[in-house]
Image (cartoon, coloured by chain):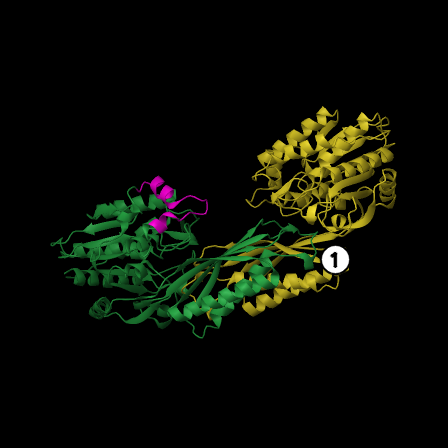
Chain colours: A green, B yellow
Amino acid sequence: MTIGVDQERLVNEIEELALISDAEAPAVTRIVFTPTDLKARAWLIARCEKAGLAVRQDPIGNIFARWTGSDPSLAAVGTGSHIDAIPNAGKYDGVVGVLGGLEAIRSLRDSGFRPKRSIELLLFTSEEPTRFGIGCLGSRLLSGTLSADAARKLLDKAGASIEEVRRNAGFQGSLEEVRLPDGYYKAFVELHIEQGPLLEQQKIPLGIVTKIAAPASLRFSIAGVGGHAGAVLMPDRRDALCAAAELILAIESAARTSGAVDTVATVGICEVFPGAVNSIPSRVDLTVDIRDTNLERRDAVMLAIQAARQTVAVRRQVPIHEELLNADAPAQCDPSITETLSQCCVKHQLAFIPMVSRAYHDSLFMSRTAPVAMLFIPCRNGYSHRPDEYASREDIGRGVTVLAEALATLAA
Amino acid sequence: MTIGVDQERLVNEIEELALISDAEAPAVTRIVFTPTDLKARAWLIARCEKAGLAVRQDPIGNIFARWTGSDPSLAAVGTGSHIDAIPNAGKYDGVVGVLGGLEAIRSLRDSGFRPKRSIELLLFTSEEPTRFGIGCLGSRLLSGTLSADAARKLLDKAGASIEEVRRNAGFQGSLEEVRLPDGYYKAFVELHIEQGPLLEQQKIPLGIVTKIAAPASLRFSIAGVGGHAGAVLMPDRRDALCAAAELILAIESAARTSGAVDTVATVGICEVFPGAVNSIPSRVDLTVDIRDTNLERRDAVMLAIQAARQTVAVRRQVPIHEELLNADAPAQCDPSITETLSQCCVKHQLAFIPMVSRAYHDSLFMSRTAPVAMLFIPCRNGYSHRPDEYASREDIGRGVTVLAEALATLAA
């Protein structure tokens, strides 16, 4: 069997999908269950059907596109990722895993290969936390990490419940039905851009992920006292934004002094109310994202941040409310799948290194219901979640070739 | 002549106007030239016409409602304020000066008084900087502080020019026509809530303003480097929000250590891009408002802030672009008008104190084309620009009584 990945077709599809966006090109914005997201999903389904795959969608909108194997009673082999994109992001992030997975399946079929196990392409709903404040919504529900009851409590920024939003988007049925039965997948492999600079710096085309870092996120709501910017003197102020500034610097410092370079903490959202030039901020909402490959160290950093919150709140006399949005454990990839990936790299004479995924992915949650592994390809400067995110067609092609080889091996 | 201010009618009007708002009661949001602002203006014009005043509007939307005096050739006596309101503000701010001015005129007429000089109620366009980033747009143009050419360069947040916005709102003619001829007003008196706590704390019903503090505002745009919150390690980051946090604290510190309690500095706007929980902030825009009663001290604080900007930019390697939005000189009130106001207080047996206005007002700019003074009444806790801003009907009534007495004296 010779796998012939059609790089041209794949890159054209990546470009085409990038135009289904709420941002001006080259930026991509695709928020879950917006008209743009629904349009992108319809576009993907049409591509999958054209490739002869049987498509089904579950009540949260996860899309399964199946190439039925010669023995459909066997557990399937899965691959896939997400196509939702944070505001002003790039074209490649989850898209390479979805369209690359589709191309891997097409190239296998074109090569004459016929799988014994079914091979299934998966599109996960809302890997990005943009709309509901929680990442990996689809894979959390698939893996039972998030219960249907807990999911039903989620609201978007406009106050709409997930039930309302998904049903308006056309996804019926009960969220209880989303959970996959144990043993549904024999293996799940996610192809992804690295989102970091290591592969590029070391000029190595492939990374085989052995561990996925543990993410946690917190929301702080700082309740200051508003007032007129001219009339309230400095000693009388309880400025919510000044308190936020201290907390932001304390969060940065906690991550920097954890004792390991693997610790990162980010305040990505800082919303100021009322938000007028001549008004003292009365409230600031911050969202903090904390990650580490080591769970204990990450939790120690969270404790340091929580202590800083206390200090700032007391010294400035501004109450700071804290909400833990999520705190997930890190995942280990399955050694037999990573071994398969290594052998596929060797077969195609492609260099690879074992890696840690510092970004989290749907595979983190899929690891709780199936053996998983991830395959990384380089991206320019390590940039991701930006309009200038970029992976070359050659690097994408190499990733898809190894993915196809691995799917064939696992499904044979 | 006995001036009988109808407190009931006035308070009912204040409540009625508060309902023309883009925020949920009791909050008031009224941004210049929005449908809501235009509705409020139409409501006011109807009230003025019902009171028998001759109404005209200039090309920037300043409204003049005139009670023609027995000698129309004499310079008029003016009073008034604004009705635009920042997001989530209160009912009283500029409204007391507008509706209080109208009530003063009505009560004078009801008392049988007939003025020699015309008395004119003025509604200034866009005292608040919310939409165009510059406060006192109407009075700056009236007084020639802002040239028509400079005004035409102003854009709102959506990128619409002031020419486009005002013409769409129905205000035709050239902005050059807005400038008042010198000597148009013999005197201008603005009634306003204090927006600070002093009158309430000292249980004194009236403040006569002798000086208006000098405001300045700056905009900083901090250009960091975005990226994925999981993948970029801490030492490699150029986080725009962490840089903003340092700058915010430096601004607070510069105001606190100026050597005088009269210095205030506020960061009221902090906008973070892209604004996603898992994305390192690539850009932050801050707007800073700096005020002092002493021009040199204010400028020294601005220099300290500009130095902090340099330090932060260099240490964090993030370029910080600075734009000076405005830097106005403080104003002195006219001694003969403040003396008139004092005599009116004495006549009505009302206690008063001389005061500094720390907030700025249209009177600051009107002082460049006319002799001005301001009359303050207490507001609860000194709160302003908040939904719980409050002035009692009795305090408002006392202010309007003294205003009416002063208008009568000045126009006799």
Residue B322 image point, x, y percent: 62, 58
Is B227 contained in the magenta span? no
The answer to whether residue B58 is left or right of residue B208 is: left
Q: Chain of mark 1?
A: B
Is A167 contained in the magenta span? yes
Residue A190 image point, x, y percent: 28, 60
Which residue lies at the image location 20% right of the left edge and 51% below the top edge? A66
Q: Which residues are magenta?
A: A149-171
Q: Nearer the viewer, residue B90 or A383?
A: B90
Residue A179 image point, x, y percent: 27, 52
The answer to whether residue B223 is left or right of residue B310 is: left
Which residue lies at the image location 30% right of the left edge and 60% below the top edge? A363
Q: Nearer the viewer, residue B297 or B399?
A: B399
The image shows residue A276, relative to residue A204, as above or below, that is above
Which corner quadrant holds the N terminus of chain B?
top right
Residue A348 image point, x, y percent: 22, 68
Kind of residue at badge 1: Asp
Residue under pointer 1: B262
Q: Is residue B238 visible?
A: no
Query: How many other residues sit within 10 Å of disc 1, few (<14), some (14-19) or many (≥20)?
Result: many
Which corner quadrant holds the C terminus of chain B?
top right
Which residue lies at the image location 79% right of the left edge and 40% below the top edge? B189
Residue B244 sits in which quadrant? bottom right
Which residue of the protein is positioned furthest toward the bottom in this rendering?
Answer: A259
Secondary element under disc 1, as helix, strand or loop, is loop
Q: Is residue B364 visible?
A: yes
The answer to whether residue B114 is left or right of residue A302 is: right
